[in-house]
Image: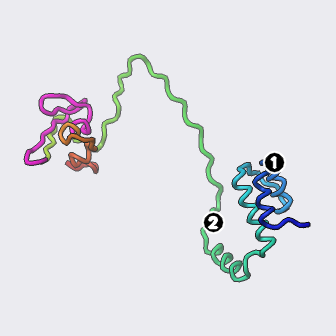
Amino acid sequence: MVPTLSQQLAELQQLNTPQLRSRFASLFGEQTPANNRAWLIKRIAWRLQSLVEGSLSERARQRAAELANDADLRLNPPVPRRPAPQARERSVVDNESPARDRRLPPPGTILARPYKDQVVQVQVLEQGFAYQGQIYKSLSAIAKVITGSHCNGFWFFRLTRQGDQ
């Protein structure tokens, strides 16, 4: 007695990956490099259903061929990725300072922004920012002090694009 489609699909769930690969090879007539169990089950189930209930209609095949003719095909294989460069060793004293964010104006600039009926003024320093006599490492820290909740400092002081002040 030939098992029904639903029985065959239920049996797929009981198979392990090597058995699924073997079943794939018998149904498709070629080996697969895939080891993804869920993918194998889906492909085999599709093939079983196609064999039992019929494949695509001729109209659907023609439409698929039309779409394939219009598709942009890759003419060259993708370039393989290069291995990441080795990180250079850091000496105990590193005189290099991190790159300054391009959105920041030069040190000494006063950023002014109206907020709740007052004008907030922050001075840009070489390393950090001065606000009400205290030094802060970031504009976000100052925005949090002012608003009482976390806020992106560049957004708060309207420095979202390079050169905006």
Rounded to the nearest angstrom, the CA distance separating label 2 from label 1 is 33 Å
Q: Is residue 155 above or below residue 71?
A: above
Q: Earlier in the sequence, mark 2 or mark 1?
A: 1
Residue 141 located within the stretch drawn in magenta: yes
Residue 100: quadrant of the picture: top left
For mark 2, give the secondary structure: loop
* Side (left or right) of 146 relative to 152: left
Per the rendered image, the range of residues in magenta is 115-143
Which residue occupies the foreground of this view, 39 or 49?
Answer: 49
The residue at 67%/75% (across/down) is 64
Q: Which amino acid lies under the numbered mark 2 shown in the image of this protein? A: Leu
The residue at 82%/55% (across/down) is 31
* Side (left or right) of 155 relative to 117: right
Please count the marks in the image: 2
Residue 111 x %, y %: 16, 42
- Circle 1 residue: 18
The residue at 73%/82% (across/down) is 58
Q: Which mark is residue 39?
A: none
Residue 149 x %, y %: 24, 41
* Side (left or right) of 92 relative to 53: left
Q: Is residue 16 above or below residue 83?
A: below
Residue 161 x %, y %: 28, 51
Which residue occupies the foreground of this view, 54 or 6?
Answer: 6
Q: Is residue 106 above or below residue 21?
A: above
Q: Which amino acid lies under the numbered mark 1 shown in the image of this protein? A: Pro
- Circle 2 residue: 73
* Side (left or right) of 131 relative to 89: left
Residue 6 located within the stretch drawn in magenta: no
Q: How many C-alpha atoms fall within 10 Å of the one at disc 1: few (<14), some, or many (≥20)?
A: few
